Amino acid sequence: MEGKMQHLRLAGGFITACTIAVTPAAASSHGWSTASNIGRDALVVAALGVPAVQGDWTGDLQAGGSILLAGGGAYGLKHIFPEERPDQSDRRSFPSGHAAVSFAAAATLENRYGWRAGVPAFIVASFVGISRVEARKHHWYDAVAGAAIGTGSGFLLTAKRTADVSLVPFADSQGAGISLATRF
């Protein structure tokens, strides 16, 4: 148990250090964009790294699935709802992919390992969403939509490590749904 706590403290410290390190660089829109890239990447590394270090391969698969679902969902919605970015660079503003991926990683850490891993991760994910708005890459509602997509995928696809009850999504050619599984 103590080894697990050390890994969680290490992940929290890593995420906090990354946030502190990128904050001064965020003075210009380019700085904000760079800071959001670093924050997103740090969260992905933490969401995949914490389970890997613990040998929790199920957690790694769930984190990877959550991140891919959020990123893919955001990418698909960008093409369905073309919204011009505030900097007018293109029409792929809605929703924020950075926020979706960051919040998926944060929700995975929260749901799998508890609040000690989740709170710092959600702080960094929030920083990423704010950074995307400050970089003029997204409107505030793009970041909020990305956060909702990411949080939803993180909580949907990730189970608590010691859960006795879990929700399992399923899909086939006839439809999709969620199955409830419990252990007695």
Image (cartoon, rainbow, N blue to C red):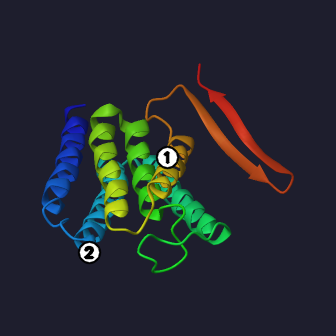
Q: Residue furthest bottom?
A: 89
Q: Is residue 160 left or right of residue 2?
A: right
Image location of residue 35, percent across then percent down? 25, 65
Q: For marks 2 and 1, give the one nearer the viewer.
A: 2
Image location of residue 69, percent across then percent down? 56, 58
Vertical side of 136 occupied by 110: above or below: above
Q: Residue furthest right?
A: 174
Amino acid at circle 1 = Gly
Q: Check the picture and name the quadrant holding the C terminus.
A: top right
Vertical side of 125 occupied by 134: above or below: below
Pointer 2: what residue? Answer: 30
Image location of residue 105, percent across then percent down? 40, 51
Mark 1: give few (<14), some (14-19) or many (20+) Cα within 10 Å. Answer: many
Amino acid at circle 2 = His
Vertical side of 95 occupied by 109: above or below: above
Q: Is residue 31 left or right of residue 108?
A: left
Pointer 1: what residue? Answer: 154
Residues at marks 2 and 1, CA–CA distance in whole angstroms: 29 Å
Q: Nearer the viewer, residue 129 or 102?
A: 129
Q: Secondary structure at mark 2?
A: helix
Q: Residue at x 45, y 60 (%)?
A: 139
Tag count: 2
Q: Secondary structure at mark 1?
A: helix
Image location of residue 100, percent across then percent down? 47, 56
